[in-house]
Amino acid sequence: MKIQAEALLFDNDGTLVSSIESVHRCWTRWAGEYGITAEQFAAVELHGRPAAEIAADLLPAELVDEAVARIDELEVSDVAGGVVALPGTLDLLASLPPERWAVVTSATRRLAEARLAEVGIRPKTLISADDITRGKPDPEPFLLAARTLGVDPARCVVFEDAPAGLTAGRAAGMTTVALTTTHPAAELSADVVVSDLSAVSAQATVGGVEVVAGA
């Protein structure tokens, strides 16, 4: 599928990089520290949501701020050796002008920058959990990214591996490309579904980017 766009918006974890082993280690330790049972933990959707929302689902309100700071500390300290670039990520980003793409993540800025730096990615524009009041599946993060880049949301392409992120992209009125790096295709609703970013190519054009996704 060929898509004419003005900007490409990428989720981070599960889209650009894989930090799944680090996430599992850190959140398991965090849950143990706060006395959260395996059953309680399993009932909460973790992927693609801000840590503050996850903590609020599991803990009393008075513990949330402290608990969010703790998981951030654990995850940042676990970045070295725990994060790898997913297939196609580095080549695709290298083909794009810096002003034509952004990272839009549910992680804090500190954690997102640490994970991206681990694989050599330093985006000009990064929208994190620190910049928004409502996380994915709300469209606010993607709409803020479009506004920051100065482009029409309808001319943006969202790359996501999580249902919450795809829902946010659709609600923002953007074209969506789903990656099956975390969820099977049957669980992903998008305009295009690909295995990972190695199935995507892009070429800068006058005023935008031409994207080819999938076959």
Image (tube, rainbow, N blue to C red):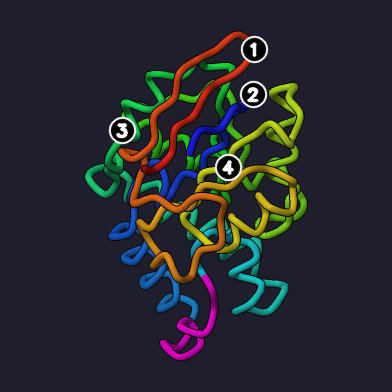
Mark 1 or 2, nearer chain start: 2
**Label 4: which secondary element:** strand
Kind of residue sitting beneath label 2:
Glu
Kind of residue sitting beneath label 4:
Val
Percent x, y of residue 25: 31, 65
Asked whether, in this view, residue 146 is left or right of residue 194, the answer is right
Image quadrant assignment for residue 89: top left
Q: Are marks 1 and 3 in contact (CB under 8 Å)?
A: no
Kind of residue sitting beneath label 1:
Gly
Mark 3 or 4, nearer chain start: 3
Q: Quadrant of the C terminus?
A: top left
- Judge whether residue 31 is colored magenta: no
Residue 207: give its label: 1
> Within 10 Å of the Cα at label 3, are there few (<14), some (14-19), or many (20+) other Cα atoms?
some
The residues tagged by marks 1 and 2 sit, at their Cα atoms, a distance apart of 7 Å
Residue topped by disc 2? 6
Front of the two marks 1 and 3: 1
Residue topped by disc 4? 158
- Judge whether residue 40 is colored magenta: yes
Q: Residue at x 29, y 45 (%)?
A: 83
Mark 4 or 2, nearer chain start: 2
User: Which residues are the magenta region?
Assistant: 35-45
Task: List the single residue furthest toward the left.
Answer: 81
The residues tagged by marks 3 and 4 sit, at their Cα atoms, a distance apart of 21 Å
Residue 119: give its label: 3
Q: Are marks 3 and 2 in contact (CB under 8 Å)?
A: no
Percent x, y of residue 158: 58, 42
Q: Are marks 1 and 2 in contact (CB under 8 Å)?
A: yes
